[in-house]
Amino acid sequence: MQIEKIPLADWINSLVDRLSHFAGFFNSITNFFQTIINAFQAVFDVLPEWLFIILILGLTYWAKRDSKKWGLLIFELFGLLLIWNLDYWRDMTQTLTLVLTSGLITVVLGVPLGILMAKSRITDQIVKPILDLMQTMPAFVYLIPAVAFFGIGMVPGVLASVIFAMPPTVRMTNLGIRQVPADLIEAADAYGATSWQKLLKVQLPLAKSTLMAGINQSLMLSLSMVVIASMIGALGLGTQVYFAVGRNDAGAGFTAGIAVVILAIILDRITQAFNSKRH
Amino acid sequence: MTVKVEVRNLTKIFGKRISKATDLLAQGVSKEEILEKTGATIGVNKASFSINAGEIFVIMGLSGSGKSTLIRLINRLIEPTEGEVLIDDLNLTALDKKSLRNVRRKKLGMVFQNFALFPHKTILQNAAFGLEIQGDSQDTRSKKAHNALELVGLHGYDDQYPDQLSGGMQQRVGLARALASDAEVLLMDEAFSALDPLNRKAMQDQLLELQNKMHKTIIFISHDLNESLRIGDRILIMRNGSIVQIGEPEEILTAPANEYVERFIEDVDRTKVLTVNSVMTEATTININKSGPRVALRRMQENSISSIYVVDDDDRFVGFADADDVATLIRQGSKDLKSILKTEVPLTTPDTPVQDLIDKISNTPIPFAVLDNEQHLLGIILRGSVLSAIAGNEVTA
Ligand SMILES: Nc1ncnc2c1ncn2[C@@H]1O[C@H](COP(=O)(O)OP(=O)(O)O)[C@@H](O)[C@H]1O
Ligand SMILES: [Mg+2]
């Protein structure tokens, strides 16, 4: 006896077909994201390299004003100068644009979703498997529909990054809020706090460092997506790596890769510095 | 006396099969058995009592007896399974969420065993929390919170954070948080239990001192009898979710309702609580206007005592006669008891703490006479009865 193959692939294809009737909807999403991307890129294109470097150093200095910082400042200075020298500057800013845009979207969507999960058991149970799916589904798979709906370019790249990178932010927001000690919630209730007051005055401030750790992880994950994103036309350091692979040019591949690493370390340390507690 | 908080038939059952548990409870099945049969836990079982305005009402019981549940039923942090809570005749159990929040904001303050201070807020911001929730302006709440902190004796810590303060100081902040919003009723769940003995004593003193000024209605949970006796105007004793006894400290000590309460009071330092009233015994007296030396001597011989108190027609204290003096008087053929009466006897009043007498009582051979305001002789204090009262035995004589 032969069992018919379940036509799962056909179903998904017809779903994708049907969704493409909503081209107008996807176009407006594309335009909206493109606007954010353009805004970031415009700022980076206007800034002269030296000013950008000074701003990064200044930001680091301020973020780590209470802790050891000189090692990082020196690393940042030489790292950025190296990227400039290797002529990867514009690629680096494009990658930064991709990471910041997907980071922004991740926070705007992920934090409220995490809060919702912390407050409602049903949401928690529905969203958890979806998050697992988002993180484990091979990225190539959703590149296909992403191109179908959003075309080629930065926007599908950003969306692919968001899908891959958002789960830690959602999870850590959820975790951070759940970890707030029950007696503090009880104290807030005993003094007549509303749900919003509890969230804004107690839960979010206390979840802040866990939440920031989630955002930091999300940024790192979206950086790890830059090569894949470059396959659907997202420009940046990923494109350089991708080309180097195509040309079998190990040297170019490594130098672009090193630029990614430098950017990653800078982003990581600065977001961590914002997270470190002080009083 | 006005009733501030009234609790009627308040019951809380935790768990799933609540209606089954309720039925069993009504049949008088025990807490353990109900847990075994239904998986439901009896938190509080049909508690009814009322608390007067300005009273410190202590709820006492072993761990797990339902104290925390009971106090949380009062501000509905835990929803009752049955029963009602009234504050100023307002039925809290019937309120919707918004009105309940309003009552919590305006009338109720809570102090927690582990302080429950917000680690991300400064001391001032912590004390101001209730006011912040009420939506007071920054200025008002800083001022009120600052005053509340001064009131509990915390000067100059406004801008520090809770983890920079010792436990005792943190709990002062917890108390200030409750006082800052002018709550009329303070709910204190083992508020001092996490403190070391010295700090605890200091906080008790401070609470009593504040209470003298502010006359709040305080519901105070404790598992420490000495603490309860020290600060409580009345004490409620719980066991397995049920009320075992409610009474003034002295009542609890002198007339424990059952063995459970007796075991509770076994090792209390009684001298601090007991007053002369509960350790005095009936005096053997003679009436000076009716009896002479012979009656006095016979009365002493009958009771095997060596001295006797002398009163007038209204039982007012007149003096004290020694057996030897009376015998001499008889030998001289005189009937004038007055001539040998001693008046320099140790005197005390019924509401004097026994503690105040302990030192003196061992130095005076004559028993203390207990007089009321009109000099009526109410009784006497024998050395033996003081000792046995301290040891926890009933005073019978
Ligand atoms: N949320 C809860 N769920 C189930 N059982 C509870 C809950 N809270 C308290 N209990 C049970 O209710 C009883 C009374 O607890 P509690 O009021 O905390 O006692 P106490 O404060 O006197 O130590 C205990 O048997 C406890 O296990
Ligand atoms: Mg308790």
Image (cartoon, coloured by chain):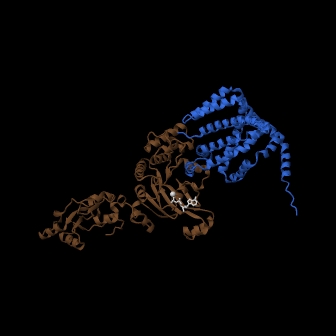
Image quarter where ligand 1 lies: bottom right
**Residue at x 25% of width, y 63% of height:** B367
User: Can you give x and y, in whole percent of width and height, for residue B34 in the image?
Assistant: 58, 68
User: Can you give x and y, in whole percent of width and height, for residue B36 in the image?
Assistant: 58, 69
Judged left or right of residue B170, residue B276 is left
Q: Dividing the picture into quarters, in which one does residue A217 lie?
A: top right
Judged left or right of residue B235, residue A126 is right
User: Can you give x and y, in whole percent of width and height, for residue A68 in the image?
Assistant: 55, 36
Residue sitting at the far left: B332
The answer to which of A187 and A82 lies nearer the viewer is A82
Judged left or right of residue A48, residue A193 is left
Q: Dividing the picture into quarters, in which one does residue B27 lie?
A: bottom right
Q: Dividing the picture into quarters, in which one does residue A258 lie?
A: top right
- Can residue A204 be seen in the rendering of this structure? no
- Can residue B279 be seen in the rendering of this structure? yes
**Residue at x 40% of width, y 58% of height:** B226
User: Can you give x and y, in whole percent of width and height, for residue B28 in the image?
Assistant: 55, 70
Residue A31 position (above or below residue A8): above
Q: Quadrant of the N terminus of chain A?
A: bottom right
Chain B palette colour: brown
- What count of labels does the image hold? 0
**Residue at x 46% of width, y 43% of height:** B149
The answer to which of A247 and A278 lies nearer the viewer is A247
Q: Which chain is blue?
A: A
